[in-house]
Image (cartoon, rainbow, N blue to C red):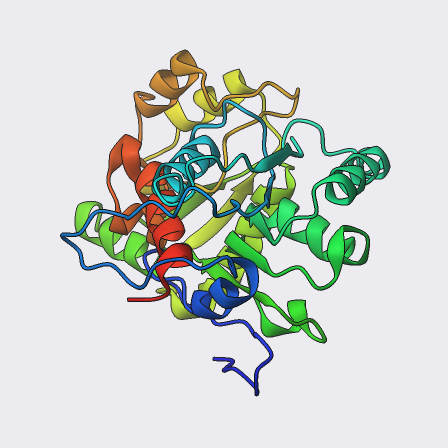
């Protein structure tokens, strides 16, 4: 695990979503207007004096408004930050890369963001998930090479990703495939075949690479088939007719091959969940193991904001 080198802020990362290490460094760099010291669990945040200028923050979201997870992250983040900076109004840029992955869009997105950074130079840049992090890192010189950058939800992190960079910290997301297969073995001990369900999206490809990295550590009793080019109807039909001894492992079903967006499609979710023939499982990430149900994104965002305000506890 990387450690600080001198006074230069460097990355600290872990596999959990409840601890973001290294934020004390960003606190000194980004919030130099003077935040209060660490709170005890029972204390309420103390508002800063009225004359304190709230820090400008740029939040780059990989997705679109309406994507519940990242919406909740931002909501939780702001709910914890605003008691200290009531007048804060962060600049939030939605890249919407899941629905519109065309790289040709990067040029005008960059020009828009660079203009916003010129008018309101941020003291801190926050990225949500891989697409936003990749974008911010690729164009960091245009956005502000010296601005501290905090990432969240980053899949398949390696230290080489930020080689030669400084002022970056955050938390990596890793799915618990080992725990998922322990559950499969417990609930369906006769399973010998796994249908791995993904799609052609960038996020799904990242998850497939993570899964393939984990394969050497998984039991060798299984055979695997990848199913990634499907329409919603084809996927539901396929799952409903799988033979005994087969389990579906869902990596990503947010969009089908025709571009139909499933994230908020309740009828699709119900049809897939109730398809007869075999159980389907989605590997939990650390964020899903540490917080609960609908509020998990909000809780994580609030905890993240609290750590930025107070430093690690």
Residue with the most extreme left position: 42
Q: Residue at x 76, y 51 (%)?
A: 143
Give residue 91's position: percent from left, percent from top: 61, 36
Give residue 81's position: percent from left, percent from top: 40, 44
Give residue 225's position: percent from left, percent from top: 51, 45
Is the residue 144 above or below the residue 106 in the image? below
Give residue 19's position: percent from left, percent from top: 34, 62
Label tally: 0
Residue with the most extreme top position: 267
Q: Nearer the viewer, residue 295 or 40?
A: 40
Q: Nearer the viewer, residue 181 or 303?
A: 303
Q: Residue at x 84, y 38 (%)?
A: 111
In the shown orientation, is residue 64 left or right of residue 188? Answer: right
- Residue 279 appears anywhere in the view: no
Residue with the most extreme bottom position: 6
The image quarter in which residue 260 lies: top right
Is the residue 64 above or below the residue 30 in the image? above
In the shown orientation, is residue 104 left or right of residue 18? Answer: right
- Residue 280 appears anywhere in the view: yes
Q: Nearer the viewer, residue 274 or 31?
A: 31
In the shown orientation, is residue 257 left or right of residue 78? Answer: right
Q: Residue at x 39, y 55 (%)?
A: 309
Pick the quarter of the image with the C terminus: bottom left
């Amino acid at each position: 695990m990387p450690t600080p080198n001198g006074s230069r802020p460097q990355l600290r990362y872990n596999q959990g979503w409840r601890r973001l290490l290294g934020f004390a460094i960003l606190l000194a760099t980004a919030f130099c207007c003077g935040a209060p010291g660490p709170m005890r669990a029972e204390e309420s945040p103390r508002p800063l004096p009225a004359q304190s200028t709230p820090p400008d923050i740029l939040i780059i979201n990989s997705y679109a408004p309406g994507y519940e997870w990242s919406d909740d992250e931002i909501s939780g983040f702001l709910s914890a930050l605003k008691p200290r900076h009531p007048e804060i109004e962060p600049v939030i840029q939605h890249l919407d890369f899941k629905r519109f992955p065309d790289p040709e869009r990067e040029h005008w997105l960059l020009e828009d963001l660079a203009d916003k950074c010129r008018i309101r130079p941020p003291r801190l840049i926050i990225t949500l998930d891989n697409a936003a992090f990749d974008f911010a890192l690729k164009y960091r010189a245009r956005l502000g090479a010296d601005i501290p950058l905090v990432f969240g939800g980053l899949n398949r992190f390696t230290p080489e990703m930020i080689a030669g960079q400084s002022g970056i910290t955050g938390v990596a997301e890793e799915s618990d495939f080992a725990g998922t297969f322990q559950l499969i073995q417990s609930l369906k001990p006769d399973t010998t075949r796994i249908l791995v369900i993904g799609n052609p999206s960038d996020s799904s490809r990242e998850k497939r690479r993570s899964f393939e990295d984990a394969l050497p550590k998984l039991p060798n009793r299984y055979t695997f088939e990848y199913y990634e080019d499907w329409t919603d109807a084809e996927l539901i039909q396929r799952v409903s007719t799988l033979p005994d001894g087969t389990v579906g492992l869902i990596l990503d079903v947010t969009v089908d091959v025709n571009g139909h967006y499933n994230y908020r499609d309740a009828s699709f979710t119900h049809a897939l969940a109730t398809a007869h023939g075999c159980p389907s499982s989605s590997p939990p990430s650390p964020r899903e193991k540490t917080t609960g149900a609908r509020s998990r994104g909000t809780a994580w965002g609030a905890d993240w904001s609290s750590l930025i305000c107070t430093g690690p506890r």
